[in-house]
Image (cartoon, rainbow, N blue to C red):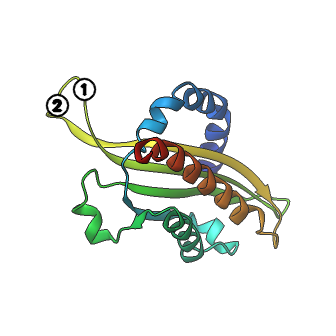
């Protein structure tokens, strides 16, 4: 299992330059996909080793939700999510492991997922990630500050993009 996690993290890290380039090229479209969002659900999925290091779903979710509320985004519960057009949710996932040196390596993915309709066939509906950010970090045992700081930075970038996308709509 640990080998699978390590391979997954290395794959994510090795593909990151391509991932970043793809996002940069599509920035106007990416911003466009945030327009008109008024509410969303927040889903946090931390792998076991990151939880064992002391990072908790509740703290992370609370921080993300507060940042979204501060810019006027309503936080949905799981029941409301199913009744909201597009079913938008912001998902934070970690893929991390403890290194032999005693520290941790971690990839953090933050993505906005929402329902979409295919252009080539309007009858086909699915879910797609319409905004995302990926960061990789390492931190030493007992020094968890880098992980919450990184999540706050990622959330801040989402909030900035959200504000930029929705400012022109309101003004």
> Residue 66 at x, y = what percent?
54, 70
Quadrant position of the C terminus in the picture: top left
Specify the quadrant of the image occupied by residue 33.
Answer: top left
> Residue 58 at x, y = what percent?
54, 76
> Taking 25 as reference, is 143 above or below it?
below
> Residue 140 at x, y = what percent?
83, 64
Which residue is the extreme one toward the right?
Answer: 101
> Taking 159 as reference, is 17 above or below it?
above
Query: Disc 2 versus disc 1: distance between alpha carbons?
Result: 6 Å
Does 129 sit left or right of 100 as displayed?
A: left
> Taking 91 as reference, is 74 above or below it?
below
For the point 65% across and 72% down, the residue is 55
Can you identify the residue that label 1 sits on? 119
Does 23 sit left or right of 168 as displayed?
A: right
For the point 45% across and 31% down, the residue is 29
Label pair 2/1, CB-CB below 8 angstroms: yes
For the point 18% across and 35% down, the residue is 124
Front-lying residue, 44 or 49: 44
> Residue 128 at x, y = what percent?
36, 42
Quadrant position of the N terminus in the picture: bottom right
Which residue is the extreme one toward the left?
Answer: 123
Secondary structure of the residue carrying tag 1 is loop
The answer to whether residue 43 is seen in the rendering is: yes
The answer to whether residue 2 is seen in the rendering is: no
Can you identify the residue that label 2 sits on? 122
Secondary structure of the residue carrying tag 2 is loop
Front-lying residue, 168 or 33: 168
Front-lying residue, 67 or 138: 67
Does 62 sit left or right of 84 as displayed?
A: right
């Amino acid at each position: 299992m640990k080998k699978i996690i390590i391979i997954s993290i290395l794959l994510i890290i090795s593909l990151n330059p391509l991932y970043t380039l793809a996002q940069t090229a599509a920035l106007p479209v990416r911003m466009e996909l945030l327009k008109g969002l008024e509410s969303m659900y927040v889903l946090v999925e931390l792998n076991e080793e990151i939880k064992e290091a002391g990072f908790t779903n509740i703290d992370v979710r609370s921080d993300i939700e507060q940042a979204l509320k501060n810019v006027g985004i309503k936080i949905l519960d799981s029941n409301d999510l199913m009744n909201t057009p597009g079913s938008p949710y912001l998902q934070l996932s970690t893929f991390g492991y403890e290194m032999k040196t005693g520290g941790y390596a971690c990839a953090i993915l933050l993505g906005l997922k929402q329902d979409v309709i295919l252009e080539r066939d309007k009858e086909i509906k699915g879910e797609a990630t319409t905004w995302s950010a990926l960061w990789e970090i390492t931190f030493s045992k007992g020094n968890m500050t880098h992980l919450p700081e990184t999540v706050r930075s990622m959330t801040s970038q989402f909030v900035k993009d959200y504000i930029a996308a929705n400012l022109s709509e309101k003004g």
